[in-house]
Amino acid sequence: MLVACEFSGRARDAFIARGHDAVSCDLLETEVPGPHIQGDVLAELQKPWDLIIAHPPCTRLCNSGVRWLHERDLWDDLKAGAEFFLACLNGNAPKVAVENPVMHKYAVEIIGRKHDFSLQPYEHGEPHTKRTCFWTKGLPAIVPTNIVEERNATVHKASPGPNRWKERSRTYQGVADAMAAQWGID
């Protein structure tokens, strides 16, 4: 299986821990040792896989940044981001999941549909809020595994800085474990 656009290794390693052959791919090097392809994922998406989970950049697709499209004339960036998202969604696998935050209406128009389901980290043992949406092919919705009462919006309150995007883009371990448990390849 391929975990596209992942440098943390969390989802990859969650699948490996359950006995699956998994590799991550990102322009960045992996943060932890493990099977990783450093480079452009587009070629990897065309290879045959049993399962692809992708975490493409959300910068121009998400609701939180919609105001900048007109203000900074970022319409070409939106189109490029949506095309990359669709390349992930149309990857060469019978089972595909692509995650992103809630999309604004312009991104939804290009993608062609809204997400199939969303989840929160606090539904999977993590004391955090960060609604994550999934567009899927051949996969069921992930069901909660361990709902916790403590709920912090730490990802939204992260201090500005050069690595803020990196900290905000990491998959929570509880979510990675739920994906591996519920989407493990037969």
Image: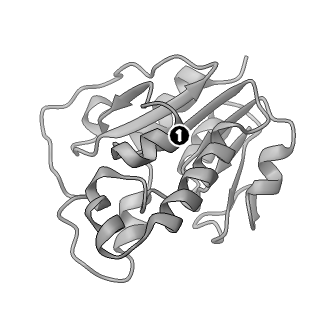
Which image quarter: residue 142?
Answer: top left
Is any atom of residue 137 visible in this view?
yes
Which image quarter: residue 35?
Answer: bottom right
Percent of width and height locating residue 149: 12, 32
Percent of width and height locating residue 51: 71, 31
The vertical placement of 2 against 25, above or below, is above
Q: Which secondary structure, mark 1?
A: helix
Q: Nearer the viewer, residue 64 or 158?
A: 64
* Residue 145 falls left or right of residue 9: left
Which image quarter: residue 9?
Answer: bottom right
Name the residue at 36% across, 52% down. 62
* Residue 182 falls left or right of residue 23: left
- Quadrant showing the C terminus: top right
The vertical placement of 96 against 74, above or below, is above
The total number of labels drawn is 1
* Residue 133 falls left or right of residue 37: left
Way the structure is coloured? one colour
Instruction: Identify which amino acid the numbered label 1 is placed on.
Output: Ile
The vertical placement of 90 against 141, above or below, is below
Mark 1 surroundings: few (<14), some (14-19) or many (≥20) residues within 10 A: some
Name the residue at 53% across, 21% down. 182
Q: Which residue is mark 1?
A: 111
Q: Nearer the viewer, residue 38 or 12?
A: 38
Percent of width and height locating residue 102: 34, 42
Name the residue at 28% across, 29% down. 123
Is any atom of residue 101 visible in this view?
no
